[in-house]
Image: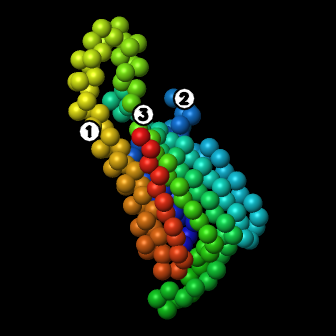
Amino acid sequence: FEFSEIYKLVHDRLNDMSYTSADYKGVGPKDLYELEYIEKGESPIQYLIRWKSLKKSQEFFTFKIDVLFQGKDISKTEIMHEGKKVKVDSGEITIEIDAAFVDDSDEEAKKHPFLKHFSEKFKKMTKDVKKTEKEAFAGDVDGLHDVVMRSFGMKGKYMPAEVAPVRKG
């Protein structure tokens, strides 16, 4: 596998789906950046990289996807692939995807000067929208999982990999 390639694929996929860093306050670049980045050693290298990302949808819903990369004993090695020597990373890598769908519609309706008087009607009105948004969020999570799986599928011939998505909400 190629650690930097997998990292970039996950980062680009989250950006393509319009996720921003969870602590983004509307000032400065919206780019998704690491909440935590720890790299120890030279060869082999130990990695711990954490992203906390979110995307607001329909004013009332928030999609949250957190990604944790853990690399253990990552070092460069040469292998033969299709008759050519290729440098790849060797070691153990774990990628955890933790996802949560947050529905703030009740709280927002209570604060709204007009909607607070019609909270039950509003709840019924948003039921279908909520279902659609949950499906869209599941698509985001599945798409991210697919990107990770495909990257190991292409390179999984060289190293075994375990990818375990975790869903909440």
Residue ID at (23%, 24%): 124
Counting other residues with Cα less than 10 Å from the Cα at mark 1, is it few (<14), some (14-19), or many (20 or more)?
few
Mark number for residue 25?
2
Q: Amino acid at mark 1?
A: Thr
Image: 32 above or below 78? above
SS for tag 3? Answer: strand
> Foreground mark, 3 or 2?
3
Mark number for residue 132?
1
Q: Residue pushed farthest right? A: 41
Q: Give the tally of numbered discs.
A: 3
Disc 3 and disc 2 in contact, CB within 8 angstroms: no
Q: Nearer the viewer, residue 89 or 113?
A: 113
> Foreground mark, 2 or 1?
1
Mark number for residue 102?
3
Residue ID at (65%, 47%): 36
In the image: residue 31, left or right of residue 16: right
SS for tag 2? Answer: loop
**Mark 2 or mark 1, earlier in chain:** 2
**Does residue 43 show up?**
yes
**Does residue 19 show up?**
no
Residue ID at (58%, 76%): 88
Residue 27 pos. (x, y %): 55, 29
Residue 151 pos. (x, y %): 45, 68
Quadrant assignment for the C terminus: top left
